[in-house]
Image (tube, rainbow, N blue to C red):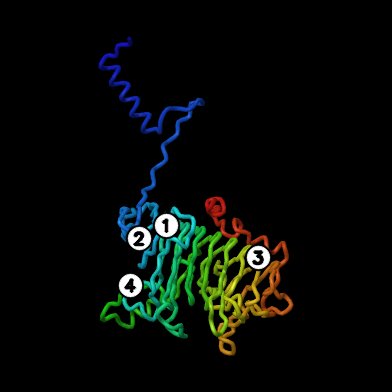
Amino acid sequence: MIRLNNGTVAGLIFLANILAIMGGPADCLGRRHLAEPSVPTFRVASDGTGDYSSVQSAIDHVPATGGVVLVAPGTYREQLLISQSHVTLKSANVDPSKTIIVDDTSQGTRGNKPSYATVHVLGDDFRAENITFQNDFNRTHEQVSAGSQAQALNLEGDRNILSNVRILGNQDTLYIGARGCGQAGSRRPPAVAGVGASAAAAALAPCTPTPTRSYFTHCVVAGNVDFIYGDGNAVFNDCEIHNTEHAAGGYVTAQGKYIFGQQSAFVFDHCRLTGEPGLAHVYLGRPWRPYASVVYLNCVMGAHIDPTGWREWHPGETHNLDTVFYAEFHSTGPGANPAAREPKSRQLTKAEATQFETVRFLGGADHWNPEKQAK
């Protein structure tokens, strides 16, 4: 039997504490590994079996350093505002149609609400998996030319990754914005009585947009008018882009930049463009502002895509097509018609298309690799 005196016991306790701080004992090569910091998890279930019964209440408890919000299958009718960075919102059920966050606020009905998006993300490094974001404003309201803009998701942070997510709406379904300029009418503080003209003038002052990046993989985005829009950078990889019914056809994108030279484009890579039966005269995009940039790579386009492909914002009134970068590479399907495309668009060579590969296009100075992170 080995007898330990008090000094020996104290020494062993001290050593154990040091090893715990250092992450445990050394490996066979003498290397010590610090323990990985734990990421707080917040469980949401509408039936009361989780830590919270609403998603926003869980988000409100996520610290500034981030956390994981695990949402049980169900339908959650609420708006979410996510200001923290490093927030992951996901469901353990791999079928995104089983976990739905839905609201019906529109630009015309928002009143004093800070946003008309069902989910509005301001923080960086947002992730979403196996979930549906939906705005069903048109469930109870007719879609008209003014006031029917109803976002399902608004992204204004950097390095966002969305995997196996459905984003559903009609007009203005998905907004992807640069930081610094904001979107007119998107998010604002509640109305304050007595705000004068000087405040309004300040809101219209010139701004300098800071680029943001978002990556969507194996997602579904649905809508009909300008339903993917904004001035952020985004890649859609292996996604379904679905046009819902609209009497006039519709527009997939409404990309637009604030200034010449702004780093901003939407890239669709190996996506499928689908539409409701009988739908026609849908355009790949129209430029919300000058200098819009949209690229389709290796996409399968349904018959609902108009042969000309692209259209002016307001024909006869605006001339935004003069400054666009609208391009395709190897489009296939009945909606692919390079010979009939708008003359101000272009067909890329293979070498030109490589600059829009995900890692190259979204990498940035921090060498971000969303393809690797999404696996």
State left or right for residue 186 relative to residue 233.
left
In the picture of the structure, the residue carrying the numbered disc 2 is 55
Residue 16, picture quadrant: top left
Q: Residue 301 bears which disc, if any?
A: none
Name the element at disc 3.
strand
Q: Which amino acid lies under the numbered mark 1 shown in the image of this protein?
A: Leu
The residue lying at 58 percent from left, 81 percent from top is: 320
In the picture of the structure, the residue carrying the numbered disc 1 is 89
Q: CA–CA distance between discs 3 and 2?
A: 36 Å
Q: CA–CA distance between discs 2 and 4?
A: 22 Å
Mark 4 or mark 3: which is in front?
3
Q: Which amino acid lies under the numbered mark 4 shown in the image of this protein?
A: Pro
Asked if the residue under mark 3 is in contact with the one under mark 1, i.e. CB atoms within 8 Å, the reply is no
Asked if the residue under mark 4 is in contact with the one under mark 2, i.e. CB atoms within 8 Å, the reply is no
In the picture of the structure, the residue carrying the numbered disc 3 is 297
Q: CA–CA distance between discs 1 and 2?
A: 9 Å
Q: CA–CA distance between discs 4 and 3?
A: 39 Å
